[in-house]
Amino acid sequence: MPIRGPQTSDQSLTLTLGLSSALRESHVLRGGGDGSRNSYVSWRKGDLIGTGANGRVYLGLEEESGAIIAIKEMAFNNEQELEELAQMQGEIELLRSLQHPNIVTYLGTDICDENKLLYIFTEWVPGGSIQALVTKFGRLSEAIVRKYVAQLLVGLKYLHEQRVIHRDIKSANILVDDRGTIKLADFGSSKRMDSMGTITNSNLSLRGTPYFMAPEVIIQTGHGRKADIWSVGCTILQMVTGQPPWKNLRLGTPAALMFHIANAQSPPPMPSTLSIELNNLLLATFSRDTRRRPAANDLLKYPFVVANGAAAEANAAESRAAQRSTPLTRSIRGVLMPNQVSAIEDAADHTLACQAIGILS
């Protein structure tokens, strides 16, 4: 991508996705394009809003629509890490066609070789993660958990219908906006499945967070959609207990924890105060036999999720969202290739027919 001259106060943006010493500056978000039209989207980098083991997140301003976006910045130190980040970039680019109210919208990525940085651009979700909510307010009530879980399952159902496995579902990767809408985020570990619906052969590397890993992921025998379902159960436990599953066993090291998960025949310890409906839901997600572990669509029919209209409300919100697009979505359409636009339209139609579905870890 060409580098243009520096921006002045009355000029439009001129830089590619490289960093400079300035705290705030404009860059170019890489878009699709067939060469016959402008494929650039301008954005302005703002304040640092979070840091984690995998990078830093900044606020950004998309200058055409005026929409606030989030910009995740990840550094790589050698050629091997660069290859891994390039592969991650490719996976995330595939996610740009996913449009759902319970999935963070990915707008694009770019690698800056000179500064050894990968940028990931997503919609901005005010409010923070479920983990942050639990840290600030303590354990969540079953009423709140029900609403969040219904939305999570609707989003996950859509994701799995697109043959995408998230592979790192946990409360830190589920964002909540100011109206209580949750969005699944951080697809850095995600993979598209093969025609058999599993990830096998060369894709057996451990991905995810040990507390939330399914046994089949740890054993590395090949895993599919049901690995995400196990992680959903772990996430629910964190919401209702205030800490990750297995943590009260004090197993000491990640290796000891993973050994225990891979070999234990019982589910993670669960509070005796849980309702029967929630207890049954959790037991289903923790089935060690993946053939008996329910799919997201099946879990949406469980009494805990159906109660008080939570599942119906989540499905209705999905259908409403499929019939409209935001200004940011419309502005991004201009930088997508024709086949990507078609994929988005097909996904919307599919959502209506089937009632289907960061940043920092």
Image (cartoon, rainbow, N blue to C red):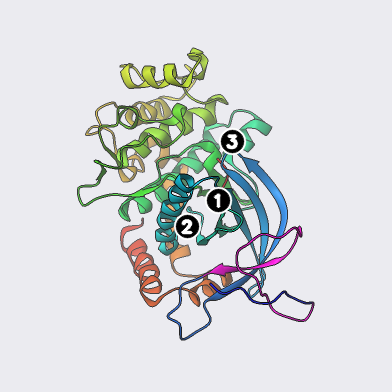
* Magenta-colored stretch includes residue 28: yes
SS label for mark 2:
helix
Q: Which residue is mark 1?
A: 181
Specify whether 348 is left or right of 133: left
x 51%, y 42%: residue:
148
Specify whether 30 is left or right of 355: right
Would you place residue 296 above or below residue 66 in this image? Answer: above
| Residue range of the region highlighted in magenta in the rendering | 9-30
Q: Quadrant of the C terminus?
A: top right
Classify residue 289 by image quadrant.
top left
- Residue type at mark 3 is Gln
Query: In front: mark 2 or mark 3?
Result: 3
Task: Measuring from the top left, give residue 77's x and y in whole percent.
Answer: 55, 45
Classify residue 141 by image quadrant.
top right
Q: Which residue is mark 3?
A: 131
Among all residues in the image, which is located at the extreme left? 196
Q: Nearer the viewer, residue 129 or 336?
A: 336
- Residue type at mark 1 is Thr
Find residue 317 and name its label: 2
Q: Is residue 310 visible?
A: no
x 44%, y 39%: residue:
168
x 42%, y 80%: residue:
34
Would you place residue 68 above or below residue 304 in this image? Answer: below
Marks 2 and 1 close (CB-CB < 8 Å): yes
